[in-house]
Amino acid sequence: MRAKIRPVTPAPRQIAENLARIRERIAVAAARAGRRPEGITLVAVSKTHPAEKIRELYEAGVRHFGENRVQEREAKSAQLADLDITWHMIGHLQKNKAARAAGLFDVIDSVDSVAIGEKLNQARNPLAAEPSNRSFSTSRLGVLIEVKLDPESAKSGVAPDESQRIGEAILRLACVDLRGLMGVPPYFDDPEQARPYFRRLRELRDALTAHLGASRLPVLSMGMSHDFEVAIEEGATQVRIGTALFGERQKT
């Protein structure tokens, strides 16, 4: 029988200590790049972790959390409804789940097609949405375009040379707010090897900003537990940290 994988869930004190170490590493990396750590948003990747661990991290000071699946966010919703969390959808979003995602998340970090953008726009429009989908805020939904940085992988994302076309189309949608780009480089044991990929994403963001004629893309979401310091040095404004906060997953 195949072993199940469950997250290792540190005690509250351990989570607070993990958070303090991550914040210190963010500050040091920011200083190396001549930046202020306040300009970098920490998104805690809470996928597979229970609501009580999210609450512990919230009480330790984290306000941004990322989930990979619509169903998992729904399952945790009632238990965390009293917390002022900014929820990020960081996993691949299917078109048939876009309307649900628009009501559950504050930001969709993984838009990879104009069609997804249009579905989110329609779902967020209170005049066009189905009555059952009108319970969420009518404010514009924040979105990031996910760029595929590793052409050899099966990961989702738009091709780099498609980012301008898709950015232009999403910018025309009235109920979504295009804020920037997100990307995941190939995994390397040596984080330095990811640097060219992070630099490429920053260059794409800067080129898209120039093309659109305004500084309207402030977010550059890149870097995870094993490589976020290099990402910050290359301009990341948002890092997605899971393992280094919650601990490794263990087989049982």
Image: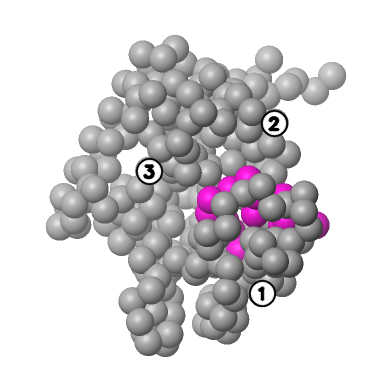
Classify residue 246 as left or right of residue 91: left
Q: First in sequence, mark 2 or 3: give its number.
A: 3
Tag in front: 2 or 3:
2
Magenta segment: does it hold 6? no
* Region in magenta: 96-111
Q: CA distance from mark 1 to mark 2?
A: 28 Å
Image quarter in which the C terminus is found: top right
The quadrant holding residue 172 is: bottom right
- Residue type beneath disc 2: Ala
Is residue 110 visible in this depiction of the protein? yes
Q: Secondary structure at mark 1?
A: helix
Q: Which mark is residue 231?
A: none
Q: Which mark is residue 42?
A: 3
Q: CA distance from mark 2 to mark 3?
A: 23 Å
From the top left corner, tell me how far across and down residue 109 is, in percent: 54, 56
Q: Which residue is mark 2?
A: 75
